Image (cartoon, rainbow, N blue to C red):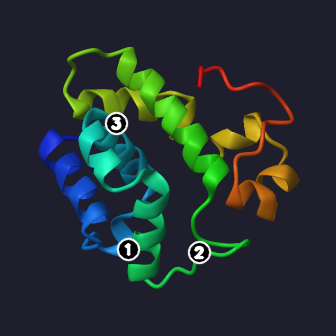
């Protein structure tokens, strides 16, 4: 399980250079990488944002980015907003501590977006390709 800052660093760098083994790209790893990238905005900016990183990683691991699979813009942007809120709530804390806090909360459930989006809306090609506002409840984190 990803708990240390060193492990979070390894996950994020594996995403960036496309060397992270696909079986390790878990729900927890997604958020570990997000927290690391949010804590290193210069790297996120250099890479062009989260979308190109994930799309490139998907392609490197044999996952096609299409209207029905691969990168999902709405989930990614919502996840980044949630991760940023948890990070801001733990100023100066080690990323491993922040990740544990994030995963012990609502974002730790892989199906957390379904609190805010109906499954049909969230899984639509539109939501996968571009931001789509929630249709069940507003997100609790600011943009």
Give SS at disc 3.
helix
Describe residue 38's horizontal placement relative to residue 19 as left or right: right
Residue 113 shows in the view: yes
Residue drawn where x is 85% and y is 51% of the image: 121
Q: CA distance from mark 2 to mark 3?
A: 23 Å
Q: Which residue is mark 2?
A: 65
Q: Earlier in the sequence, mark 2 or mark 1?
A: 1
- For this orientation, the residue located farthest to the bottom is 62
- Residue 14 is tagged as none
- For this orientation, the residue located farthest to the left is 6
Describe residue 131's horizontal placement relative to residue 119 as left or right: left
Q: Which residue is mark 1?
A: 22
Q: Position of residue 50 (x, y in %)?
A: 44, 52
Q: Earlier in the sequence, mark 3 or mark 1?
A: 1
Q: Which residue is mark 3?
A: 38
- Determine contact: label 3, label 1, CB under 8 Å: no
* Mark nearer the viewer, 2 or 1: 2
Vertical relation: 72 (above or below) 45: below
Give SS at disc 1.
helix
């Amino acid at each position: 399980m990803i708990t240390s800052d060193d492990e979070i660093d390894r996950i994020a760098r594996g995403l960036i250079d496309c060397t992270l083994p696909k079986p390790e790209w878990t729900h927890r790893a997604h958020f570990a990488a997000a927290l690391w990238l949010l804590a290193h905005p210069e790297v996120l900016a250099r890479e062009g944002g989260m979308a190109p990183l994930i799309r490139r990683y998907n392609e490197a691991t044999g996952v096609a980015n299409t209207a029905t699979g691969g990168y999902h813009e709405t989930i990614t942007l919502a996840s980044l907003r949630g991760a940023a809120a948890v990070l801001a709530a733990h100023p100066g804390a080690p990323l491993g501590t922040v990740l544990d806090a994030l995963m012990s909360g609502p974002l730790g459930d892989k199906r957390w977006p379904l609190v805010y989006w109906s499954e049909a809306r969230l899984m639509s090609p539109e939501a996968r390709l571009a931001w789509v506002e929630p249709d069940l409840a507003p997100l609790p984190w600011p943009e």
